Amino acid sequence: MANTIVDCFVTCAKHLESLLAEEVRALGGHSIKETVAGVTFKASMPDVYRVCMWSRLANRVLLPLVQGNVEHADDLYALVQQVPWEDHLSPTGTLAVDFSGSSNAIRHTRFGAQTVKDAIVDLLRAKTGKRPSVQLKQPDIRVNAYLKRDNVIIALDLSGESLHQRGYRLQAGTAPLKETLAAGVLYRLGWSSHWQDYPMLVDPMCGAGTLIIEATHMAMDRAPALNRQYFGFNRWYGHIPLLWREVVTEAQDRFAAGHERDLPELIGLETNQATLNAAYNNIQRAGVKDKVQIKHQDLSTLSQVIGNCEKGFLVTNPPYGERLGNDATLLYLYQNLGTQLREHCMGWDAGLITGNPELAKRMGLRAKRQYSFFNGALPCKLLTFEVSPEYVVKARRPVEDQSSANTDAQIEAPVSAGATMFANRLRKNLRKLKPWLKQQKVDCYRIYDADMPEYAFAIDCYSDWLHVQEYAPPASIDPERAQQRLLDALSVLPEVTGIASNQIVLKQRRKQKGTQQYKRQDQTGELLSVTEYQARLLVNLKDYLDTGLFLDHRPMRRQIFTEASGKRVLNLYCYTASVSVHAALGGAAATVSVDLSPTYISWASKNFALNGLGEQHQLIQADCLTWLEQEHSKFDLIFIDPPTFSNSKRTQQDFDIQRDHERLLMLAMSRLDKQGTLYFSNNFRRFKLADALFHQFEVEDISSKTIDPDFARNQKIHRCWRLRHRS
């Protein structure tokens, strides 16, 4: 069988088919045809073994045994029994069946696999009186069945397990790149044939080290399956051990020679300690610890790492996704990568894997070529760069607002015309707010609120942080165009505001249902102390959609402060109790703050402690309506800012502001002293105060008095009323 020519099918990731065809041809295959996610070829068994040993791109090497139409389940059973399985498997051996595809006859892969298994077992039992057993892990043979349009191919899986499993990557980073895909990237970039031309290869975001390990193995001529202990042909009756040993010996000899080669400097940078540890372990298992350097450094140190190296090779797989996450650092990461390449890597070649090409456009470098491929189910691009002045995007300086006081400020290029307009609007807003801010003792305020409809964001300053909320674009807006505008905005924020890019947090605001806006989005637990008049308050910019401080209610907190002296103050739906803190600092005799959420009651407690406030200020975790029905204390000053809707699991009935506000306010007014004042606020745009309240109490709409200049553009951001008992 050594010289027998067999037909094979080799699978790979989509868009790597042409590379795989070249690789198989170099390993001795012929009559090669590309198909979707694989290639077919003819070869002798020694060359099939070489494909199993040397292919860096293949996932599985399949040896077809029979093919035919399957219009009924019985057809599948009969087709499988056409194979003389006694020539492939011991009657007492083990097997596993992988089945993919479906048709009208075979609708479930489990049923298809069971049918194939039954056909093999029944045939061997009928011929020998014995039967093989199923073993999912490392069986004697693995049978692959692929069904498409009523046609099925039954094949032996000679790889046994996917060939991307080289054996060194037992630990992965947060967004791992398969070994076969990493090899495909390096093939596309020409590293395998031109590595001698480069004195240095750097991966500045190396993760668990997959790219740099594959690059090192290529340069060392190390076969990817050299240390692999299990193949699907190990106990296959058609296996020829002598031929296989020759292939193994050849691979060992080539690696021994390759190990003595003078290689380029191979350097990976990684900032996350856990991922760094994984990279160290993977490199050791890969047998390249004496060839590769992994440094606990970040992208900003690239110039120190490469020194005066005038020609090198940079390849990296930075974080990417279909959309930006909850912080804006991804954009700035790409911008920084572009800056590092332009400033320190002139004359280098570079390759970038990205699932978000729009981000790559912000690097200030034009890609020389781009290739499509899939990382798992995610469509990606491989962008190749020749870092030279020819490919640098020319800087576009923004047209400054001539009235701007900050005429020397310039945004680092490249920026679009839209980004320039957005930057100028921000400068105008900041200049307009400057006199007001000088009079206030606040470091939290809004600087932009969808002033330009196409740039639909709310941007708030919290001390030396920016909190950016993107309003979800309507379905009529092209998502790609919406993201371009978002990236425009983010790109200019650091320069215009003077706030560092790693202190800009991004969120997307959608229409919320129930208590979604209060649900945790992240797990950082980072609390930032900010100043508002006399108060110090804690905010969390990352973990929730809202930050713990509603900036638009600042005038109400100021009003409560001025009225609270000597009074008993009740704060219902208190959230993080910032109103109660202001009341306490204003000299309130006592405060009671009620909220159903234990998270916010705990947060409120921290706010009181931060301001050194004592035990006369009570925090109660309870449903506000239930508490009002049971509580009979009287208060001089009450503040109520309920949610529009709530359906917490801690209550038996949901809360709807339009339906339930009359009952809520009637109960609250019954707890208000005859000379007292109740302030009621909500942000439901279509809200209408019940007529009965106007008849029973003195009611004044004070909404216009509760809007500070930073919210002047949005007079409807909330509604507020003052209620008093009639004389």
Image (spheres, rainbow, N blue to C red):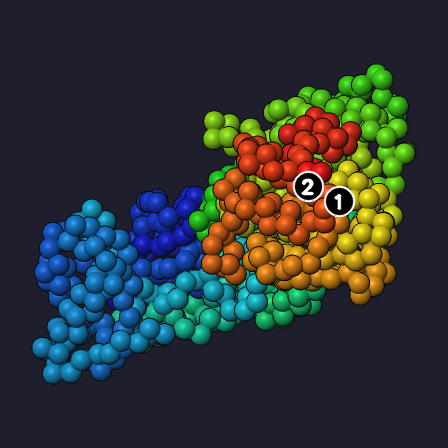
Q: Residue at x 59, y 34 (%)?
A: 695
Q: Residue at x 21, y 54 (%)?
A: 107
The residue carrying mark 2 is 725
40 lies left or right of 113: right
Q: Residues within 10 Å of mark 2 (few under 14, many from 20)?
A: some
161 lies left or right of 387: left
To which quarter of the image does residue 483 belong? top right
Question: What quarter of the picture does the N terminus occupy?
Answer: bottom left
The one nearer the camera, 237 or 134, is: 134
Disc 1 is placed on an element classified as strand
The one nearer the camera, 575 or 376, is: 575
Q: Amino acid at mark 1?
A: Gln
Q: Residues within 10 Å of mark 1 (few under 14, many from 20)?
A: few
Q: Amino acid at mark 2?
A: His
The one nearer the camera, 526 or 47, is: 526
The residue carrying mark 1 is 675
Q: Position of residue 225 (x, y in %)?
A: 47, 66
User: Would you place residue 559 above or below residue 256 in this image?
Assistant: above
Asked if the residues shown at circle 1 and circle 2 are in contact, with their CB atoms under 8 angstroms apart, the answer is yes
Q: Residue at x 24, y 78 (%)?
A: 133
